[in-house]
Amino acid sequence: MPDSAVDPVDTVTEVPVAVVGAGPAGLMLAHRLGRAGVDAVAIDLRGREEIATTHRAGILEADAARDLVETGVSDRILREGHEHGGTELRFGGRAHRIDFRELVGASVWLYPQTEVFTDLADARERDGAAVHFGVRGTEVLDVDTDRPRVRFTAADGTRHELRARYVVGADGSRSTCRGLVPEPLRVRYGTEYPFAWFGVLVRAPASAPELVYAHSEHGFALISQRTESVQRMYFQCDPDERTADWSDERIWATLQARVAGRDGFRLVEGPVLERSVLRFRSFVQEPMRWGSLLLAGDAAHTVPPTGARGLNLALHDVKVLAGVLLRALGAEGEPALADYQPLALRRVWRAQHFSSWMTRLLHTAPGAAPFELRRQLGELDSVVGTRAGRAYLAEQYTGWPTSA
Ligand code: DHB
């Protein structure tokens, strides 16, 4: 029987770090290492075009935005992104602004994940680094030794083997890398939600200058933006909802009902360009390191999208991980890796809490008792009605310093 782990390959590459997953987390890690003179080869099952056109989150913490510029990825965010000094909560038919700048001296940037990815992929190409998109047959081997390997077939059909010192699993919420941590040694925490998001891209001018998170008796809606003429919106739906059942008219009627209020607020309508149902859950796998394998981003933890923590959390993981890997590959050696999980995990669990809290604050569970709706309105009123409540939301939403 042929053993694929020893089959001959066309190319063997010795590289300090092999990164499985070339989304924002994997590419930003490789970029950070590259800047410090350490090579990292990243691979991804998906094609570059596929990743660049998969619509995801839109909000970056100010620290993450600054890191893109200061680490030399790109300064495009400063020209094409939009800095938001606050956000709006709508409930009981009224708008309540949370002023991030005034409350906590912070802001966030509207800059879609697709643009972050494009900037990173361009930067890797500009720096002459190896990124293999559209690979098949990935095998991650020997992570319990100090000579782990990654074998794969590149898009052009050639077989490759990366011989690395460390392998990073940045392969997203459906990670296969995380399954390499032996079952008796790992713990998986998580919870499901009885709803999903129906996401649309629409051709229309913006309906609001900042994001609007709306709670209503009909369910949650989020009004976000993309460009002057394209907007991003979401509304709570059943996880089994089918996009084919949703005409433009039905989508607009649903969104309008969820943001309607006595102030007469209405969304500016236009053709729906794209529609998708986004299921979500809360998930963490510990440990984030086993042997020569380190997990980063959604591979180790997933948050529901409310509050836009996911991408920011992934970028924070790789900021910490890059520092730790540079120490481990330098004079300190492997013991430096022990610092990764404690530094990353504190923020992971804060973000788990915040994302879950904001999700439950704003969504209406199917079949919820009238008491629950009224209680939620009481909670929302407590959040916006006191400076401490508004500051809490502002602080969580805009992120935490790396040391915190
Ligand atoms: C967007 C997505 C989010 O999950 C969020 O909380 C805010 C904005 C967006 O796609 O723009």
Image: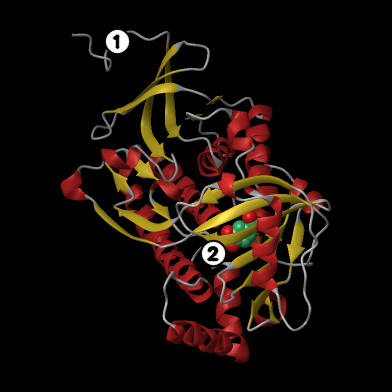
Q: Position of residue 336 (x, y in %)?
A: 35, 49
Query: Is residue 200 depicted above or below 391 in this figure?
Result: above
The residue at which mark 2 appears reads as 306
Pick whichever, 46 or 144, lies toward us.
Answer: 46
Q: Which mark is residue 7?
A: 1
Q: Is residue 322 above or below residue 82?
A: above
Q: Is mark 2 within 8 Å of ligand 1?
A: yes
Q: Report the residue at 33% width, 8% height from top.
A: 8
Q: Secondary structure at mark 1?
A: loop
Of all residues shown, which one is farthest toward the left?
Answer: 184
Distance Cα–Cα, label 1 vs label 2: 46 Å
Q: Which mark is residue 368?
A: none
Instruction: Classify residue 221 by image quadrant.
Output: bottom right
The picture places residue 154, in percent across and down from the top left corner, at 48, 17
For marks 1 and 2, the one nearer the N-term is 1
Q: Amino acid at mark 2?
A: Thr
Asked whether 128 or 90 is in front, the reply is 90
Image quarter for ligand 1 equals bottom right
Query: Is residue 233 found left or right of 163 in the rendered image?
Result: right
Q: Is residue 296 left or right of residue 395?
A: left
